[in-house]
Amino acid sequence: MKSVKDIMSPLEHCLSPTNTLEEAINIMYSQKWNTVPVTNHSGKLIGVFTRSSMYQMILSDVSKDTPISDYIKKAVGTVLEDVDSELLETMIAKSRVGTGIIINKSGKPVGLFTKANAVMNYVKETQILKSQLEKVMDTSNLGAIMTNEQGKIIFANEKCAEMIGRPMNEIIGEDMEAFIPPFSKRDDKRESHFPLVLYKQHYIVRLSKYSIDEEKEGYIALFQNVSELEKLSAELESQKKWETLLKSVIHNAYDGLVMINEAEEITFISPSLTELFELEQGLKEKTKIDMVLPHLKLSQVMNTGVAEVSDFMEVKGINYLVHRIPVYQGEKIIGAIGKIVYRQLHEVREAFKSAEDGQKETSKREGMEKSRFTFNEILSNDKQMDKLIRSGIKAAKSKTTILIYGESGTGKELFAHALHSSSMNSKGPFITVNCAAIPEHLLESEFFGYEDGAFTGAKHKGKIGKFDMAHGGTLFLDEIGDMSLSIQAKLLRVLQEREFYRVGGTERIKVDVRIITATNRPLEKMVAEGTFREDLFYRLNVISFEIPPLRKRKKDILLLSESFIQEFNRQNGTSITGWEPLFEQAIMDYDWPGNIRELRNVWERAMIFAENGKVRLEDLPDYVLKKAGYDIFLQEEEEVSELPLLEKAEQFAIQRALEISGGNKSKACILLGISRSVLYDKLKKYKMPLLKE
């Protein structure tokens, strides 16, 4: 903010009371002043000598040598030099005096401020402001128009003329409505935004009112090219992506790094990797990752969206691992980072040890039980299941015990197989024990094996147990809630000590086994009731997953159904291609208490009984039709129907289709697979009301 001393006229001369009329006239003439400050011998202001004072002395016919002391005006308005200029301009505008005296804190005059000074300063400030506004408008690429109260254009900038496609002199004075057709319809709004197309270019126009005086209003319109907004938005999005990618690099920095964008193009590669893989020092920008480093398989993580660690690989005799990490922005994958580990870090040493142990055990355990499923074979469109799978892939990398909850038939064993397949022990055995299917007195020997002669009927040379068999791999304990308290205690010891004794044996046997358990029983409630050991529960419940029942993920019913059609067509030689709409509605209405296992069984039955290429409603078991509310198709022996069963079923099907479609007959026709005219005939036949569309 400017102060008054920046724009005042500085004083070069002052008068004293002893100065003569002639001296005063000479100073006023030379300085072009109408007012001259008068000071005392200390230099402090005591008054002013004005042009009117001079006229008074001349008219009084005094001599030129007469002192001005009797003609000094002592009522003087003064302003301190540090007052801001805007306040002084306001004071001058309201003052009847044309000149103000500027004094310092000592009361000595230092300058004059006239109305002419105020006007010149205002003009200068206006010119600067106009120049600044024009610069802002040019830089922002905004077109601008201003009108008077009649809507006539009084200002337009060059950018606006370019947008409108008319020279400036043809725009000024024209009606705003000539260039903005919606203008007249919006004059009742204080401010509005609307799209406008000019010469095939799309603009967003902001129309605002401004006050000319108390009763008159004009308009200001600002034009913004939509393509420029989109470009700006794209640039901001690009910056956000880079920020996210760079943060990921910082947080995941390791031996070697390579980074790709969403198009699988290399955007960064560390010098250590170009040396390790003997790449050209000047890789071209946006080179596809699979063209130069396909063995890293970074494009794979772009598809799965799940971080993973590769098997051991080798280059120039150096073993290395690749940690593939997807980079997310919100829910969208915008790139991936490859972390290459090859130096003597803790993780590498552990991985080498695990690999060596796995190779030794593989040769010993050919023919051992292996996992049969991966996470890719778990079909689901459900968000909760998708989150569960992602968490499962992460948890699989550790050796931590995992507990899987879920109702019978939800796929707990399938999930356990997938966990093993994604683990570091995936090449090792996957041994399953159903704790509910083995008698209690045999469960201990099943777990730990027995020595020769341990009990009557024991095999010669003894037998190894499930823990022995699962060494270097995974032991899956299904129905863990059905295990007796005595076996629970022995299992707890194995989990804590990683060692056990065979039945009848004295040799301590150490094992490296990853434990995965599953149950459909409420273990926490069983702990409270004393039927399940609390210490074992907390040992098993380090990481837990609860697989939702099928009734809570209805979107998966049709997805699984398509899979079952393919499976049973191959298995049973059927040729089913799909299902009818009412069949679909019935299986969607049913709650599936047996979950996926029940759905699979129902599909196998329906495909066997189907008489054509599509399964129909009547191919479903009776109990499904009853529980789903379709029991009209089941005629009990004692029931006497007014209509034949086929016609009654047809009537029900039409009624059900209308309910599902909300009374929309076009949609009902699609569900029923009939034409609109046939539907009207059926409605009349069964005297059913004609619902409105």
Image: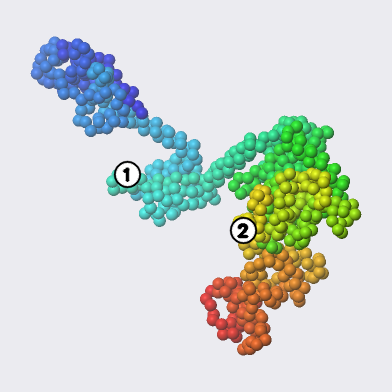
Estimate the x, y position of residue 344 in percent, counting from the top left. Answer: 75, 32
Sequence-first disc among 1 and 2: 1
In front of the other: 445 or 77: 445
Image-based side of 96 in relation to 288, left or right? left
**For residue 249, above or below residue 113:** below
**For residue 228, above or below residue 3:** below
The local crowd at label 2, few if under 14, some if 14 to 19, many if 20 or more residues have their Cα within 10 Å, is: few
The local crowd at label 1, few if under 14, some if 14 to 19, many if 20 or more residues have their Cα within 10 Å, is: few
Residue in the image at 65% along x and 87% along y:
638
Q: For residue 361, which quarter of the picture? A: top right
In front of the other: 630 or 275: 630
Q: Secondary structure at mark 2?
A: helix
Residue in the image at 87% along x and 47% along y:
364
Image-based side of 385 in relation to 47, left or right? right
Residue that extends furthest to the right in the rendered view of this protein: 460
Estimate the x, y position of residue 499 in percent, counting from the top left. Answer: 77, 45
What is the quadrant of the N terminus in the image? top left
Q: CA distance from mark 1 to mark 2?
A: 84 Å
Estimate the x, y position of residue 237 in percent, counting from the top left. Answer: 58, 43
Residue 17 in view (yes/no) = yes
Question: Label 2, on which residue?
Answer: 529
In front of the other: 189 or 611: 611
**For residue 331, above or below residue 549:** above
Question: Label 1, on which residue?
Answer: 212
Q: Amino acid at mark 1?
A: Ile
Q: Amino acid at mark 2?
A: Glu
Q: For residue 377, which quarter of the picture? A: bottom right
Residue in the image at 73% along x and 33% along y:
345
Colour approach in the figure? rainbow
